[in-house]
Image: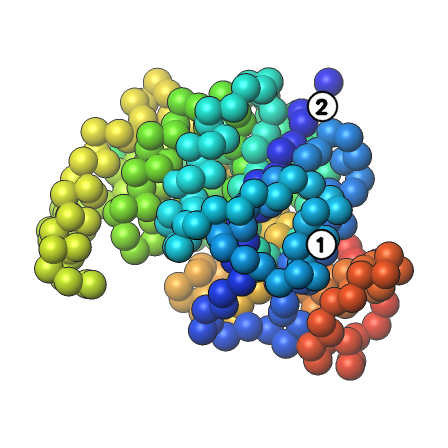
Amino acid sequence: MSSRVRIVYRSAESENTKPRPPYYSKTLALVSLLRAVEPLGDDAEIVFVNDGDVPADRLALMEAHGTVRRIEGGSNRATFRAVVAHEAALAGDPDDLVWFAEDDYLYSPDALTSLRAAADAFPDTAYFAMYGSGSLDLDASGAHAVRRDLPGTDGLPDAPRHGAAAWFRAHSTTSTFGVRRSALRQDATLLRRMPYTGGAWDRATCLALQGFRPFTAADLLPDADGGALRGAVRGVVRAAVGALVRRPSRHRVLLGSDPELVWHMEVHDYDERGRPSTATSAVDWTAVAVDTMFWAADRGIPVPTGTAVATGHRGSGSAA
């Protein structure tokens, strides 16, 4: 029996100042998710968690395709902590997947069917990522995690393939990820505490869950970024995280897809993000965006076109 997938989609009206590709819009992100959910039928449900008000057109789409909750979080950290607490308290099959989603990612049409295929193929795996190509070097890792020199499944010819992707031991991902409900219940305390560590807390969370120490000794010193008091608190919280790192016998496994099946719609600095795998580099995300716009148009859903469709053409929408 295949796993059910519950998508918890966090959204807000506000935008940040990060550079974006020309096709970017939050409506496109939402529509691409709906497209990816469609093949799952009754095996999927969506809960939209809106931080404050969202534009009426997006709200109408959400109301037509799932349950809408409105909260007053005020920040990414606050809304993440709120949805983790809420989902961890719910009943449900322990093997089902909860997919936590942010509102600025572009989904390939086969992303969620591939996620479910991997979940069914790896029943003992608790966490899944479809963004990020950082590959964990299990042989070189000790107390701290070490990335392989090659991203994704590059250099791993025997990586198992399920759905539209091969799967590998991932180093880390963002706050867009999947987790089995049983693991979510057990890990809720860690997941809710990690945002207080500051910096790239989503990356640090992934490492702590896998049993690695996410911070070096230097990271435990008071951080003056944002003020002395806040920096001191971050230092204390980071030190306390060491006690929450999972014991060796209970390390979580995080599997990543290659190619990446969802794409963060930003103009990327690969020195910071990490370079994509060969398979991910071959994905034409502009074509995926354009094809998603056509998919939406066929269903009477208007999507801001940006400049992508000026030179785009209707394609298969495949991510590989």
| Amino acid type, residue under disc 2 in the picture | Ser
- The reply to whether dot 2 and dot 1 touch (C-beta < 8 Å) is no
Judged from the image, the secondary structure of the residue bearing numbered disc 2 is: loop
| Amino acid type, residue under disc 1 in the picture | Ala
* Position of 139 relative to 199 (above/below): above
Query: In the figure, is residue 108 to the left or right of 90?
Result: right
* Position of 279 relative to 208 (above/below): below
Q: Quadrant of the C terminus?
A: bottom right
- Residue at image position (67%, 72%) is 23
Nearest to the observer: residue 69 or residue 130: 69
Nearest to the observer: residue 134 or residue 189: 189
* Position of 169 relative to 199 (above/below): above
- Residue at image position (44%, 35%) is 84
- Viewer-nearest of labels 2 and 1? 1
The residue pinned by badge 1 equals 60
Query: In the figure, is residue 183 to the left or right of 258?
Result: left
* Position of 140 relative to 95 (above/below): below
Residue 146 point in image, percent of width and height:
34, 45
Query: Any mark on residue 2, and which?
Result: 2
